[in-house]
Amino acid sequence: MANKHINEYNPSDISKPGLTILDFLEEKGWTQTELSQRMGRPINKVNEIITGKISITPETAIQLERVLGVPSSFWNNRQKQYDEFIANEKEKEKLSKHINWLTKFPINEMIKNKWIRKQKDTILQLKELLSFFSVSSPEEWDTIWMSPNVAYKQSTAFSKKPESNSVWLRRGEIVSQKILCDPFDSNKFKFTLRSIRELTNKTPDNFSDQMVDLCAEAGVALVFIPRLKGLPVYGITRWINPKKAMIQLSLYRKYEDYFWFTFFHEAAHLIVHGKKDVFIETKTSSENKKEIEADIFASNFLIPKKQWEKFITSSTKFTEKSILDLADEINVCSGIIVGRLQREKLIKYSQMNHLRRKIDFIN
C-alpha cells in the first residue's frame, strides 16, 4: 500500500501533505494520538501538520520515515510540490489582475516571429511575456523600462510606443547575449569599418554573417531584428556593458542604401560619442548635434566628400553609366549612390531604382 501511494502521487494534486499521512494512519489503524506518541511530538503539532497549518520539515520527514516506513525524500518532495502549487495559485491570482496589460504588447507578432510561445491560457501567455523580459511582474517591467532616468525613456520615439519599442529592444538584447565579443576597441572598430565597407558590393547572404563576425572582433554585437508593425525604427546604438557595444538594425525600408547608411550612422555613435548615450533612429529622429555628426560620418565614409562633390558638380545629368562608374571608382554598390542622389533631390525617387537592391535577413 505504501508503494502505491509513492508511485501514484501526482505533483499537480492540490491536497495537503497531511491528508497523505491520514491515508497511512487509516491503513495502519492508528490514531493521531498514537502517531504523536510514536514520533515523540505533541498531539497538537501532529494535528497542525495534518491540517496543513505547519509544513513538514526535513526533521519531521525523517521521523515519518521511521514511523510510517515511507522515505523522508517522499515527504520532503510532497511538501515541496504542495508549496509550489500553492505559490503558483497565488501567482495566478496576482497575475490575473494584469491581463489588460498583456493587450498593450504585439503578442501575435512576437508569436509569429517565434520570440515567445503561443499559449491558450491568458495567464500562461502573460508568463511567457514576463519571461521574455526576464521580469517577475508588470511592476518590474515598469521599473526597468519606464523609469524617468532610463535612457530609452529620454527618446521621443520610445515614449510614443514604449511597449512595442521595449519588445524590439529586448529581442536585440537576447540575440546580442549569444554573440561572444572581444572587449571594445575603438581603433580596431574603425579599421573594421573599412573592411565592412568593402562588403557593400556583396549580396546579403554573403555579407551578413561576415559583418557580425567582424564587429564582434572589435567589441560590437551586431544584430538584425525585424521591425514590428507601426514601429518606424531604423536602428539603435547602445552599450550592453562598458566593454560591449551593440548595434541593432531593423531593415526598415529594405533597400541597401538605407541599410548601409543606417549601419555607418550607428557606428559613428560608437566612435564619436559617449558610452552613456542611447540612440534610437526613426524617420522622425530629431536633428540634434550628435545625429547630424553621425549623418556626416556615414555619408563621407560611404562616399568620400571630394569624390561626391566632384561627381555632382561635373554632371548635369546623372546616368546609369556615370553612377556605375563612380561606384566602381570608390568601390561601393551603386545603390548607395542612387540613394544619396534621391535623398539630396538630385534625381527623383522613381529614378534608377533598378540599381538599388533589396535586402531581407533577420536574427
Image (tube, rainbow, N blue to C red):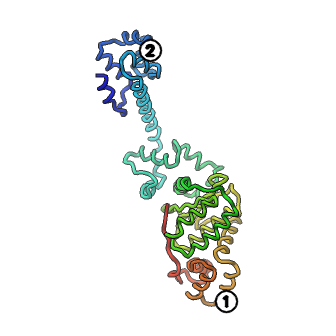
Instruction: Judge the density around disc 2: few (<14), some (14-19), many (≥20) Cα neighbours within 10 Å.
Output: few
In x, y percent, where is residue 25? Answer: 32, 16
Residue 189 location (% of width, % of height): 66, 64
Sequence order check, earlier mark of 1 and 2: 2
Q: Looking at the picture, how far across and down is residue 206, in whole percent?
A: 51, 70
Residue for point 36% across, 21% down? 70
Would you place residue 33 above or below residue 145 in this image? Answer: above
Image spot of residue 128 (x, y percent): 45, 47
Residue 158 found in image quarter? bottom right
* Figure check: 231 above or below 72: below
Label ID, residue 200: none
Tell me, for residue 45, which label it has, or none: 2
Q: Residue at x 68, y 70 (%)?
A: 297
* Kind of residue sitting beneath label 1: Ser
Q: Disc count in the image?
A: 2
At a point 64% along the width and 65% down the height, the residue shown is: 267
- Left or right? Give the position of 311 relative to 44: right
Q: Is residue 3 left or right of residue 274?
A: left
As helix, strand or loop, the secondary structure at mark 2 comes to: helix
Name the image quarter holding the N terminus: top left
Read off the residue under disc 1. Answer: 314
Residue type indicated by callout 2: Lys
How far apart in space, not on screen, are marks 1 and 2 (Cα)?
97 Å
Whether residue 78 is visible: yes
Left or right? Give the position of 4 relative to 287.
Answer: left
Query: For numbered disc 1, what is the local secondary structure?
Result: helix
